[in-house]
Image (cartoon, grey):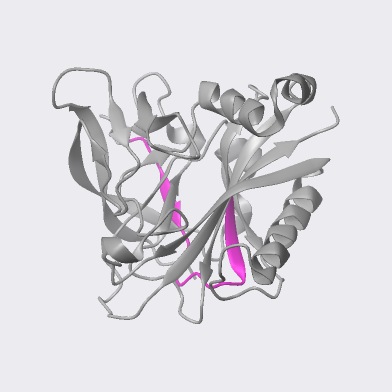
Amino acid sequence: MGVDTTGEINFYSHTKDGSFPWMDATPKLGWTDSNYVRIPVRIPIHDLRGKQNNVNLDKNGFELLKYDGQIHNAFEDNSEQQQTYYQDIINIIKKRLGASRVIIFNHTIRFRGPSRPADQCDDTHKNPVFYPHVDNDSAAAYYKVKEILGEEEAEKVMKNRFQIINTWRPLGPNPVTNTPLTICDYQSLDLDKDIHLSEVRGSQSSVSIYIISRNIEDAQKWYYVSDMRSNEMFIFKIFDSNRNVAQFGAHTAFTNDSAPSIDIEQCSIEMRCLVFYDQ
């Protein structure tokens, strides 16, 4: 059965200088430089363990899938294991979504406790991010397709539905317990009040993102999966050109109040994918 918990979410409030929100993605630790003022709020976080069929990608912005491939540990960049894992994820997304083409343009392995010092982090090895966000806003999504495919091919594929999808799963023998991922139900967001555009500086994956503020009526519903292991994976939206369905899954790492503090490394891997359809 699921174990609902509580955790502290660092919501966006306003900017320190009154200017447009910005963040600098070049620092290597979870707390990136920004002009944000964040307010930590302890909220209930609901466990999907045993209830995973209650959420759906197009309705809620995320869902839980099984990973039945062979890659369960961290791998070196540009290795054979990376190629195998990329193909695993491409096959899973194509099968689940009926997509015609999937391009993985970024992956990040995160060390979820204890945190790694900055000199042990780089573009593909980082600590978790502890504030709720969406990795690309709609303008950044169109920009990313053009950046990867070129203007001419991008204009062709963007005539049909396309998405940016993120996959997230634990790596290694230890379940992720202390700093899990939590994702907000898209239906519980006030899109006019809870979502804020922010510039991104120094990032290879985005030029602008959404950051999330606290809903004054506390209507947001946040979910995680307890004791999540490497044979399970979240799949959630960053963008969808179909405006009639859930557009994204706002997400963040959080410190789980229900889990005892342990000095054992817990790892996760996330992958950002362009997903294209024939119609």
Viewer can see residue 55? no
Residue found farthest to the left = 17
Task: Give the image location of residue 218, x and y in percent.
Answer: 30, 36
Q: Foreground residue, 103 or 94?
A: 103
Q: How many marks?
A: 0
User: Which region shows up in magenta?
Assistant: 219-235
Q: Residue at x 52, y 61 (%)?
A: 269
In the picture, residue 45 is in which quadrant? bottom left
In the shown orientation, is residue 142 left or right of residue 35? Answer: right
| Residue drawn at point x = 39 percent, y = 38 percent | 133
Question: 172 or 194: nearer the eye?
Answer: 172
Instruction: Tell whether 159 sits left or right of 178.
Output: right
Q: Is residue 29 above or below residue 141?
A: below
Tell me if 151 is positioned left or right of 16 in this view: right
Identify the residue shown where x is 63% and y is 43%: 57
Q: Is residue 56 left or right of residue 205?
A: right
Q: Position of residue 167 (x, y in %)?
A: 58, 53
Pick the quarter of the image with the C terminus: top right
Picture coordinates of residue 92 (x, y %)?
74, 56
Is 229 a magenta residue? yes
Viewer can see residue 66? yes
Q: Is residue 25 above or below residue 142?
A: below
Q: Position of residue 54 (x, y in %)?
A: 59, 51
Q: Quadrant of residue 100?
A: top right
Query: Is residue 139 positioned above or below 29 on the image?
Result: above
